[in-house]
Image (cartoon, grey):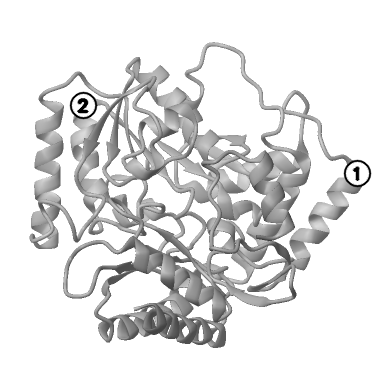
C-alpha cells in the first residue's frame, strides 16, 4: 500500500470507492493521456467520469481559467456576472427549450436536486416517476429516485418514487419484443401505473443511462411517454449530465432521439461542459423556473472562473465539431469493439452511441452478470496502459468507455487493441 493510499484511508469514509487493487494517483494530463505518480502514461477512456470532455490541459480552457482567476475568482450570484450571463445565453439557444431560463449549480447532483424542487413545486406533488436502473446523484433527493441498488444507500426519501420500465432494452420482461412492441409495452405499463396513483410531478430520465451501464431504450420511447405525460400534466426532466454536449455523436442532447413531441420541460447538465471545472445547471421553461416563491441564490454556482472555463470549452467543442468527431471515431470504435466482443464468450453485448460505449460481461456460457470479470478487465486494461470505467444494474459488470470527444482514430485503435488483450487475459 502506498503512503498516499494509507493516508487516504485514514481520513476518508469507508464508502468512498477507489478503482484498482493499487489505487492510482494521477498527476497530470495532456490531450487524451494522463500520467501517474510513478511516471506511467495511460490512454484515458473515462475522462474523470465523462467530465474531461474535450481534452486534458486544453490550452483554450486553461488560458481562460488563468485570465479570469487573475481578475476575480468569486463574487456569488448576488452580483452581475458577465461570463455567467454569456454562457447562459448560449445554453438557452442550444437547449431547444422555448423561453428558457438557466440556473447554474456546482454538480449534476445539485442540478437534479434543483430540477426536483422545481417540478414538485410547480406541480404541488411529491411523487416522481423514474426509470429502473437509473442514477441521478448522491444527494438525499437524488438518491431517493435512483433505480440502482448499488448506489442507493437508504430507503428514506423526501419523495414518493414510482419506477417505470424502459431504460434497459435487452434485459427485463420486455426484452424479447421488437422495438415498436417494446415501446408499446412500456407505454402501457406507464398508463397502468398512472391509473393507480395520484398524478406525479415529473418523469426524470437519462436518455442513455450512465452508471447503469450505458443502456438505452429504442429511439422514440420518451416521445411516446410524453403523449401520456402531457395528458396528465406531468413534466419531463431529461437528465443530460452524461449524454449532453454531443457525446452520443448523433445528437447534441440525448433527448433529441426522443424529440418527436418536443423538448423536455426541464433539462439538467453538468460534467463535460466544464472540462473538469465544477459546473452543473438546470434549463427550464420560464414558468417552471420561476415557480419558486421564496428567495434563493447560489454561492458557488456560476462562479466567474468556472463560467469562463465553460465558455471556452463550449466554443472549442462547437468550432472543432467534436460532436461530429464523436460520431465518426465513436462509430469506428464501437465496430471494432463489437468484433472483439463477438470473439469472446464473456461479452454479452457491446452497446452505445458515439463516444459513450458499454461492454456488458457475463460468466462464460451463461447470461449471469460477471462483476469479478469486469474488475479483472479493468485491472488488465490499466496494466496495458488504458483507463476505463465500470457500472451496471443488478451487478457492476459493464465496462464503461467514454474518452474525450477529441479522440483520434489511431488512439481509438490503440485503446481497442488494449481492451482486446485485457479481455483475453482476464477471461
Structural crowding at the residue carrying mark 1, measured as other residues with C-alpha within 10 Å and reported as few (<14), some (14–19) or many (≥20) = few
- The answer to whether marks 2 and 1 mark residues whose Cβ atoms lie closer than 8 Å is no
What residue is rendered at 50% in x and 16% in y?
Answer: 292
Residue 63 against residue 229 in the figure, above or below: below
Residue 171, position in %: x, y? 18, 57
Horizontal side, residue 307 vs residue 234: left or right: right
State which tag comes first along the sequence, 2 or 1. Answer: 1
Residue 235 against residue 324 in the figure, above or below: above
Residue 88, position in %: x, y? 62, 41
| Whole-number angstrom distance, CA of label 2 to CA of label 1 | 50 Å
Horizontal side, residue 395 vs residue 92: left or right: left
Assign the N terminus to one quadrant of the image. bottom right
Q: Nearer the viewer, residue 29 or 197?
A: 29
Question: Do we see residue 254 in this rendering?
Answer: yes
Residue 414 against residue 313 in the figure, above or below: below
Residue 339, position in %: x, y? 31, 86
Which of label 2 and label 1 is nearer to you?
1
What residue is rendered at 24% in x and 54% in y?
Answer: 168
What residue is rendered at 21% in x and 42% in y?
Answer: 225
Tag shown at residue 232: 2
Residue 233, position in %: x, y? 26, 26
Assign the C terminus to one quadrant of the image. bottom left
Residue highlighted by disc 1: 71
Horizontal side, residue 99 vs residue 61: left or right: left
Question: Do we see residue 358 in this rendering?
Answer: no
Quadrant housing residue 71: top right
Q: Nearer the viewer, residue 222 or 93?
A: 222
What is the tally of numbered marks visible in this picture?
Answer: 2
Amino acid at each position: 500500500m502506498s503512503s498516499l493510499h494509507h493516508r487516504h484511508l485514514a481520513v476518508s469514509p469507508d464508502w468512498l470507492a477507489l478503482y484498482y487493487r493499487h489505487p492510482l494517483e494521477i498527476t497530470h494530463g495532456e490531450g487524451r493521456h494522463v500520467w501517474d505518480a510513478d511516471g506511467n502514461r495511460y490512454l484515458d477512456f473515462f475522462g474523470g467520469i465523462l467530465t474531461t470532455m474535450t481534452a486534458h490541459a486544453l490550452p483554450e480552457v486553461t488560458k481562460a481559467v488563468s485570465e479570469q482567476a487573475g481578475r476575480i475568482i468569486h463574487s456569488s450570484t448576488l452580483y452581475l456576472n458577465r461570463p455567467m450571463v454569456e454562457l447562459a445565453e448560449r445554453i438557452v439557444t442550444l437547449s431547444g427549450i422555448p423561453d428558457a431560463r438557466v440556473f447554474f449549480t456546482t454538480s449534476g447532483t445539485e442540478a437534479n436536486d434543483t430540477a426536483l424542487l422545481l417540478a414538485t413545486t410547480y406541480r404541488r406533488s411529491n411523487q416522481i416517476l423514474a426509470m429502473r436502473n437509473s442514477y441521478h446523484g448522491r444527494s438525499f433527493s437524488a438518491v431517493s429516485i435512483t433505480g440502482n441498488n448499488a448506489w442507493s444507500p437508504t430507503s428514506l426519501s423526501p419523495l414518493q418514487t414510482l419506477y417505470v420500465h424502459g431504460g434497459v432494452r435487452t434485459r427485463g420482461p420486455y426484452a424479447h419484443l421488437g422495438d415498436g412492441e417494446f415501446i408499446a409495452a412500456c407505454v402501457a405499463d406507464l398508463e397502468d401505473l398512472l391509473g393507480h396513483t395520484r398524478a406525479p410531478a415529473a418523469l426524470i430520465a437519462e436518455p442513455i443511462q450512465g452508471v447503469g451501464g450505458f443502456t438505452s431504450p429504442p429511439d422514440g420511447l420518451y416521445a411516446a411517454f410524453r403523449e401520456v405525460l402531457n395528458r396528465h400534466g406531468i413534466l419531463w426532466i431529461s437528465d443530460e449530465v452524461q449524454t449532453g454536449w454531443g457525446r452520443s455523436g448523433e445528437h447534441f442532447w440525448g433527448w433529441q432521439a426522443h424529440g418527436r413531441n418536443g423538448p423536455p420541460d426541464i433539462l439538467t447538465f453538468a460534467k463535460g461542459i466544464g472540462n473538469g471545472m465544477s459546473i452543473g445547471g438546470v434549463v427550464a421553461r420560464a414558468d417552471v423556473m420561476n415557480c419558486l416563491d421564496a428567495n434563493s441564490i447560489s454561492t458557488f454556482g456560476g462562479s466567474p472562473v468556472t463560467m469562463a472555463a465553460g465558455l471556452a470549452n463550449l466554443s472549442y467543442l462547437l468550432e472543432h465539431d467534436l460532436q461530429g468527431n464523436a460520431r465518426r471515431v465513436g462509430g469506428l470504435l464501437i465496430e471494432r469493439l463489437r468484433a472483439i466482443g463477438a470473439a469472446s464468450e464473456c461479452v454479452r453485448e457491446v452497446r452505445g452511441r458515439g463516444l459513450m460505449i458499454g461492454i456488458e460481461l457475463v460468466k462464460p456460457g451463461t447470461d449471469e452478470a460477471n462483476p469479478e470479470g469486469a474488475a479483472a478487465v479493468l485491472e488488465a486494461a490499466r496494466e496495458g496502459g488504458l483507463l476505463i470505467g465500470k457500472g451496471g444494474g443488478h451487478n457492476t459488470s459493464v465496462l464503461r468507455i467514454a474518452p474525450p470527444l477529441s479522440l483520434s482514430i489511431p488512439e481509438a485503435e490503440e485503446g481497442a487493441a488494449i481492451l482486446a488483450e485485457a479481455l483475453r487475459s482476464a477471461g
